[in-house]
Image (cartoon, rainbow, N blue to C red):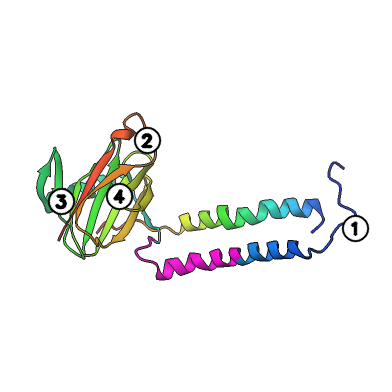
């Protein structure tokens, strides 16, 4: 964990997975409104 | 290389008061982490963020049909609409109004569908702590059970243009 390049990778990858990718997946899984 | 690694023996393990501070902060992080799912499961009337895709045109049409079939009156030019208890209610946000006025019954559960016809608005029910972002293209569903009667104001709390400060609505709850 002393490697600054590893830290940079983790600093980008972890938020990307937990926020951006998670959000994309949630949006893709949204179904169309039935408006009952 | 512009980034240097620290020397190999840089780490000094925390001790004494530093351990206490780190321990307290860590414990509190754990409390807050557990509090999030706990409040979702055991808290009262927490929205799970139930949403569906919809076009503004579709939603606007559905609101129109809802108003036609459930209209019970009018107030200052806005239709007052009473949905069936246990049923679905529709509320649309647009620059710069909330349409229609909903009349609900205390203790009855409703599925309130809210969407925007144009841009992002904020649904804020006063004086309660209920605040939701309302986006065009999404049907946001709130499963709502009024627990007190009265007239509750809706204000838009997401800046939406020059008339934003006038964008108010109402939900009336009867006993």
- Foreground label between 1 and 2: 1
**Vertical relation: B18 (above or below) B114:** below
> Which picture quadrant has residue B57?
top left
Proximity of marks 1 and 3: CB atoms separated by less than 8 Å: no
Residue marked by disc 1:
B8
- Give the distance between the C-alpha atoms of the residues marked 2 and 4, in whole angstroms: 21 Å
Q: Chain of mark 1?
A: B
- Foreground label between 1 and 3: 1
Q: Earlier in the sequence, mark 2 or mark 3?
A: 3
Q: Chain of mark 3?
A: B
Q: Earlier in the sequence, mark 2 or mark 4?
A: 4
Q: Which mark is residue B160?
A: 2
Q: Position of residue B30 (x, y in %)?
A: 59, 67
Respond whether the residues carrying marks 1 and 3 are from the same subunit: yes
Q: Earlier in the sequence, mark 4 or mark 3?
A: 3
Respond whether the residues carrying marks 2 and 3 are from the same subunit: yes
Q: For this rendering, which residue is in front, A30 or B77?
A: B77
Which contiguous range is marked in magenta? B28-47
**Few, some or many residues within 10 Å of mark 3 (<14, 14–19, 20+):** many
Respond whether the residues carrying marks 4 and 3 are from the same subunit: yes
> Total label count?
4
- Foreground label between 4 and 3: 4
**Vertical relation: B122 (above or below) B25:** above
């Amino acid at each position: 964990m002393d490697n600054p390049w590893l830290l940079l990778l983790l600093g980008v990858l972890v938020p990307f997975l937990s926020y951006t990718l998670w959000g994309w997946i949630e949006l893709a899984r949204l179904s169309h409104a039935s408006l009952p | 290389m512009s980034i240097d690694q620290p020397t190999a023996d840089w780490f000094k393990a925390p001790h004494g008061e530093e351990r206490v501070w780190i321990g307290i902060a860590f414990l509190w992080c754990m409390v807050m982490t557990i509090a999030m799912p706990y409040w979702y499961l055991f808290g009262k009337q927490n929205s799970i963020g139930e949403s569906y895709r919809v076009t503004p045109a579709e939603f606007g049409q559905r609101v129109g049909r809802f108003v036609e079939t459930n209209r019970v009156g009018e107030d200052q030019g806005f239709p007052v609409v009473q949905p069936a208890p246990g049923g679905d209610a529709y509320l649309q946000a647009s620059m710069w109004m909330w349409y229609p006025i909903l009349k609900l019954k205390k203790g009855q559960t409703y599925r309130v569908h809210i969407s925007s016809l144009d841009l992002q608005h904020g649904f804020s029910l006063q004086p309660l702590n209920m605040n939701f972002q309302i986006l065009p293209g999404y049907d946001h569903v709130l499963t709502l059970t009024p627990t007190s009667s009265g007239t509750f104001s809706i204000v838009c709390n997401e800046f939406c243009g020059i008339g934003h400060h006038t964008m108010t609505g109402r939900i009336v709850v009867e006993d």
